[in-house]
Image: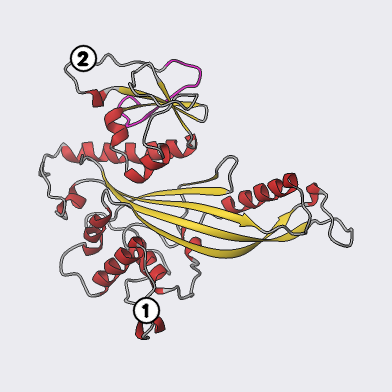
Amino acid sequence: MAHNLITQVQQHEEAPVSQVPTDIDDYNTEIKMNLRGQLFSITRDDLMALPESILLCLFPNGVFVDMNGNIITNLTEDDIVFVNFSPDCFQYICQVFDTAVHDLQLSEQAGQHQQIYDINDPNILNDKPSIIVLREDLDYYCIPPVAGLDADAMKKIKLFVGEELVKNTKIFDGLGYEPGKQLKPAEQHLLDMLCSSGFKIDGEWGHRSLEPGKTVVFSLALVRLATESSEAPSVEGSPSLKPISSVSSLSSQPEKRKSRLSTLAHAVSRSGSRGRKEKNSTATKLLLFWRKPARKCWWSDSVLDIDISSLRIKNANGQPLGHSTIKIHIRRVWTLELSVVGIQ
């Protein structure tokens, strides 16, 4: 992996320190990171080239910290930055961006791409590999199955519920998608936009895991943008870009405030439904998300059948509980961003 964007270092081994000449910019210096016990190595330049929505996951406070949580003010190649982030997810990020960088190197060998781009130039999406970054932060709140549970029993129930939520890896289940079911307008526009840009209607999260010690499920999907030269394969049952009208939009009641993600998805969906005045209009509209992550937040309720027999909990009649229906409240936050590889 000598030419990879990001390399992993075996645990308990010293990462090789590059001999950086004094005339090379500091951005080429190597940064060693400890992600929950696993060591990784990356150059500062490659790290800062990652999408903002991913950098915020790695460094939520915007600073490097050591093993004691102290801020590293003068980072050297001997320092190890401690990051509270899933190493499996980071490896997934490595693989996707390594592949994109490799594809970019192959395409640049032809020497047919322009060197300078305007931020609104749609040709950038055809010349450079682009990755759609979709992140889900799912917080869940459990209702106790019986009254009087102690904190330890409730903690275990929350863990069981989290493990069950992780098993559902379908991306669009969070939007309430089911074959033949009509979604609300905002959710339908968002689903249409993503499916026309490279996502599959039955696609799964590239990474999904329960955050240690929290009632939070973290999910990430990195999908290559489908351009005019590389269209996404069609999937039976995939939605088409059709404008959707609702009863609420025709009424005189004040319109509910929409998130920026819902508003932009609506604009992209409508532009696709009117017919393409220019090639690949949906992909071009996604430039609105380049370096500008957009978010959508919503609540939902659900019930899960969980086996809690190991906890030896009894109901009001003194009978032990086995498989029990656990009611949960779910808060989802989706973050969408476009990353164009090779553009600083």
Horizontal side, residue 251 vs residue 303: left or right: left
Q: Position of residue 147 (x, y in %)?
A: 78, 58
Residue 334: which quarter of the image? bottom left
At x 21%, y 59%, the residue is 284
Task: Judge whether residue 238 can be spotted in this image.
Answer: no
As drawn, the label of residue 21 is: 2
Helix, strand, or loop for circle 1?
Answer: loop
At x 23%, y 75%, the residue is 274
Horizontal side, residue 62 vs residue 307: left or right: left
Question: What is the three-letter code of the residue carrying label 2?
Answer: Pro
Q: Which is nearer the eye, 146 or 86?
A: 146
Magenta stretch encompasses residue 198: no
Horizontal side, residue 291 vs residue 36: left or right: left
In the rendered picture of this protein, how many numbered marks are placed on residues?
Answer: 2
Helix, strand, or loop for circle 2?
Answer: loop
Q: Which residues are magenta?
A: 1-14
Q: Dot 1, crowdedness within 10 Å: few (<14), some or many (≥20)? A: few
Q: Position of residue 254 (x, y in %)?
A: 37, 79
At x 29%, y 56%, the residue is 226
* First along the sequence among labels 2 and 1: 2
At x 23%, y 61%, the residue is 285
**Main SS of residues in magenta:** loop
Q: Decide: is 43 above or below 263.
A: above
The N terminus lies in quadrant = top left
Mark 2 vs mark 1, CA separation in Å = 62 Å
Return the residue at label 1. Answer: 254
Task: Judge whether residue 4 can be spotted in this image.
Answer: yes
Q: Dot 2, crowdedness within 10 Å: few (<14), some or many (≥20)? A: few
Question: What is the three-letter code of the residue carrying label 1?
Answer: Pro
Horizontal side, residue 64 vs residue 155: left or right: left
Q: Position of residue 270 (x, y in %)?
A: 27, 72
Residue 66: which quarter of the image? top left
